[in-house]
Image (tube, helix red, strand yellow):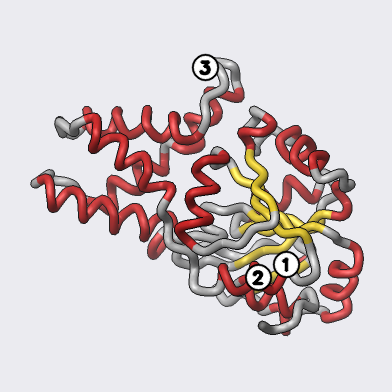
Amino acid sequence: MNTPSASELDVDQSEQVADRIEVVLCDVFGTVVDWRGSIIRQLETMSDSRGWDIDASTFADEWRGQYGPSMNRVLAGEVQWTNLDELHRASLLTLLDERSIAASQEDIDAMVKFWHRLDPWPDSASGIRRLKQRFIVGTMSNGNVALLTNLAKYAGLDWDVILSAELARRYKKDLDSYRHNVALLDRPLSKVLMVAAHPGELNVVSGLGMRTAFVHRPHEFGDSGQSLPPDQSVDVACEGFDELATALGALPM
């Protein structure tokens, strides 16, 4: 599906959004970084060196497939607060057991850290630097603070601030996660633009009064792709962070 670029949208609308916001917060996995391609690459390298019989693409998809259900168990109170690294570890152990792969503790630790080394989409780092000229720019992610900090160093993501579900001890399906993190910046929700490649998240936060920007990432899930939500459900839609920066009036660098 063709996504309307920011240049095809109402320029006045983008300018109005820019004038009304002070903060740009970004979903990270899929929106800023290519989690799937990065996990596949690292899995292939490790499995080749260990002689494991792993289909890296399938393994990556199944590992990510446990992301939502594992967080739901935390939100439902079935397990106490557990950060994303530990949820990834628990899911990984299940997948390795299902495949009868006898990974060492060192290997397991290294695989959990795969999520700390995800490659950014080509436009992410430059677009974030441009946005910082005009706004406070940070993460709003389910990733824990250590993960997001290491990822920023690895991927060259120059955030002003790292906000995380870990700080609220509530994952993002709970709206208090957004409320708590935005309050840490001493800003009202209406002054915040939430950027994500996931229409569902944007639809939810718009109900909180946050502004929304959709970034199209057609290859996040491989060939399955992503589609654009209805135009009226987002304030800005774009193909990447450089285009978003231009739409919001940030100067080239």
- Vertical side of 247 occupied by 193: above or below: above
Q: Secondary structure at mark 2?
A: helix
Residue 82 percent coordinates (x, y): 52, 25
Q: Looking at the image, which is closer to me, 142 or 250?
A: 250
Point out the residue furthest to the left here.
51
- Is residue 161 shown above or below 13? above
User: Few, some or many C-alpha atoms within 10 Å of disc 2 (few <14, some 14-19, many ≥20)?
Assistant: many
What's under tag 1, amino acid-wise? Answer: Lys
Viewed as shown, does residue 35 lie left or right of 128? left
Q: Left or right? Give the position of 92 relative to 51.
A: right
Q: Residue at 42% across / 56% down in the picture? A: 118
Calculate the distance from the C-alpha at mark 1 to the C-alpha at mark 2: 5 Å
Residue found at x 52% / y 64%: 156
Q: Position of residue 18 (x, y in %)?
A: 85, 69
The answer for how far apart the CA atoms under marks 1 and 3 are is: 38 Å
The residue carrying mark 2 is 129
Judge left or right: residue 188 versus residue 229.
right
Residue that badge 1 annotates: 132
Do labels 1 and 2 touch, CB within 8 Å? yes
Which residue lies under the disc numbered 3? Answer: 79
Q: Earlier in the sequence, mark 3 or mark 2?
A: 3
Q: What residue type is disc 2 on?
A: Arg
x, y percent for residue 117: 41, 53
Front-most of residues 71 and 165 = 165
